Image: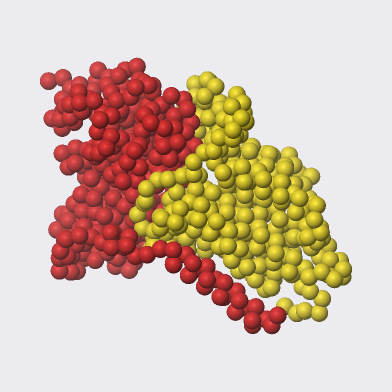
Amino acid sequence: MNSDVIISVFVTGIALMTPVLWAALGEAITERAGILNIGIEGVMLGGALTCAWCIREGAGITTGLLLSIPVGALIGVILSYLWVTRGADQIVSGIIFNLLALGVTTLLFEEYLKGVGVVTSLDKIAIPGLSEIPWLGEILFTQNITVYLALLAAVLVFLLLHRTWFGLYLRSAGEKPRATETAGLSVPRLRYASVIIGSALMCFGGATLVASTSGGFVTNVTAGQGFVALAIVVLGRWNPFLIIGGAVLFGVTQALQFQAQSLGFLSALPAEAWLALPYVVTIVAVVLAKSSRYPNACGVPFTPAGATR
Amino acid sequence: MHRSLRGCIAVVAAGALAFGAVACGDDESDAAAETTGATAAAIDYSVAVLSPGSASDGSWGQATTEGVDAASAEFGVTIDGKGENLLTPEEYTQQGTAFAKSGTDLILMANGSVPQSVTKVATDFPEATVCGAAMTIPEDELPANACTYDPEQQEGAFSAGYLAALTSKSGKLGVVAGFAFPALTRQVEGFTLGARYANPDIEVKQVYINSWTDVAAAKAAGAAQYADGVDIIFSATDSATQGLFAAAQEKGEGNYVIASYFDSNAQAPDVVLTSVLYNLQGVNKEMVAKAVEDEIEPTNYTFGLDFGVGELAPFYDLDSVVPEDVKTKSDALVAAIKDGSVVVPDTTVLGTTGAGATYDLAKLEATP
């Protein structure tokens, strides 16, 4: 295996990590506040379609990425209404939302984005100086803007959750919502905020998937990445820095599977075995992280005192 | 906030989301998709087509449905429906059953991995005609109202491999394919064998991504191959191919993709060297024509180079990338396949993984 191949595996792995990382960061915020958003896949599809749409209409990749944020926030409002206001079962409605999103995005794609456009994607940006570092420079510092922003977002999400009052309130809403309410805070408002912020990040993650690959939408373009993000949040124990590690692990194993299929003695294994590798690694990692503990009230609808549902 | 007011806000938000999405687009693409040419008077015959792709995937699904659209326009048959993005045999059986129950006369299942669905629906609904594309079912197992029709894709893939091997500067070629099943594997192995026929020392790397649509996976697979020195990748997947185009563009000049099923030049004119066209439009139209004339027999129809299956699309702006002598040799090979002096093995041979790398090259040239 020459160095170009090894570098390629990591360069590709980091690129593959990015949409999953955005989605996982969004899910971490949401779960910390006590909402289990199974519908990540659906939210990501919304972002992917938005971005592809804007690219097709000539508005550009940047516009597509930026527009995915309010679209994600709007989806967050809808999901919040279901889960916070209506107290709907988060798992069942999350699954149904994924199916609905797949149908709606496919319908919109077929009706309004028919045909495939010219392939386009974000340019890579070499960070001056750092990109010259052997191996590491090409792997980490010659990526597109969404990769750098994702790493920055992880830091910001960590600061939000662990270094601000708002983050403390969010976490309390996910751990002891009744106590949070007793302290005079509105648990529904906190949960609304978390789902809206989280969905915006997930939607942006879906948009990066399009922006980093072909610029075009295809049916089910997310291909299960939302579910991987769900697992990575558990693997990363709701800590943004550990979540980065989980996302890198997934991305690199996904990149490795394609290289390994045609690489000397590794190609002796059936292609299907390599294709299963990222998911096997993710499952094993989650199992090994068995001591992970969900926020106490995660997935449990909250009824404010005195309110009826 | 009053409960009803909150409900209204949610509804307005949902509406705004939908409006935002719709406002971003227009109807121009609809016009482009309309079948050109005069429409024949309607006749009392209906058809449904089921496909693993969509009618706008710029690949297998689109080429297939365009054939049915053309038949509808030319013969006046009614299209009862287009089942898109169907993957599993269960989905084909369910959709096929639904169309057969509602009285559809001809059901085309354009997925080589679902022969059991063809047999099942045809057996359950003797009044319907059910035909499966890119597959072969032993004739003694075919119900009287079923057939298969098989574009012999290995021939086109073979000539693409031949051209790629003669054009490659690195001596390394790649293949990125969807799923491993005989009708797909024969394309992968056909390409590999064709490349070996041109250059026995050529190196061909094969990768399956287990998807027709996963653009990110295709891009990752393509990037891995380009990093390994491959300069031309043959695609045997559907809309995921867009990822290969992006990988080639990212790698830079001198790296190309040979697409399949649909002329993909417009998607990435700077990297699409050519496309292997299997005349799926013509093949599907022909099957509808046979059905309308009540000529469908319980047999396996095959379509080869004589029917335009396996022809290469123009090189367009990349014409200068392919040397003139390579073009001449490539044309000669196609002629040799057509006249039988070069015999590309069929699916029984090339439908097995690894066959392209091990098949005896001496057997390719038929002895007079």
Q: Is residue B349 above or below residue A290?
A: above
Residue B233, horizontal then vertical, whole percent: 38, 32
Q: Nearer the viewer, residue B265 or B80?
A: B265
Snapshot quadrant of residue B77: bottom left
Chain B palette colour: red
What number of labels is visible? Answer: 0
Q: x, y (%) of residue A257?
A: 53, 33
Most foreground residue, A87 or B91: A87
Residue at 36%, 58% in the rendered image: A114
* Left or right, residue B126 beside residue A171: left
What percent of the width, then of the height, locates residue B169? 34, 22
Instruction: Give above or below for A232 relative to A189.
Output: above
Camera-nearest residue between B267 and A188: B267
User: Outermost residue toward the front?
Assistant: A128
Could you tell me which residue is drawn at 36 percent across and 33 percent down?
A: B256
Name the residue located 80 percent from the left edge and 52 percent from the top edge. Answer: A163
Q: Nearer the viewer, residue B11 or A152?
A: A152
Q: Which chain is yellow?
A: A
Going 69% across and 66% down the picture, which residue do you hit? A192
Q: Does B324 sit left or right of B2 as displayed? A: left
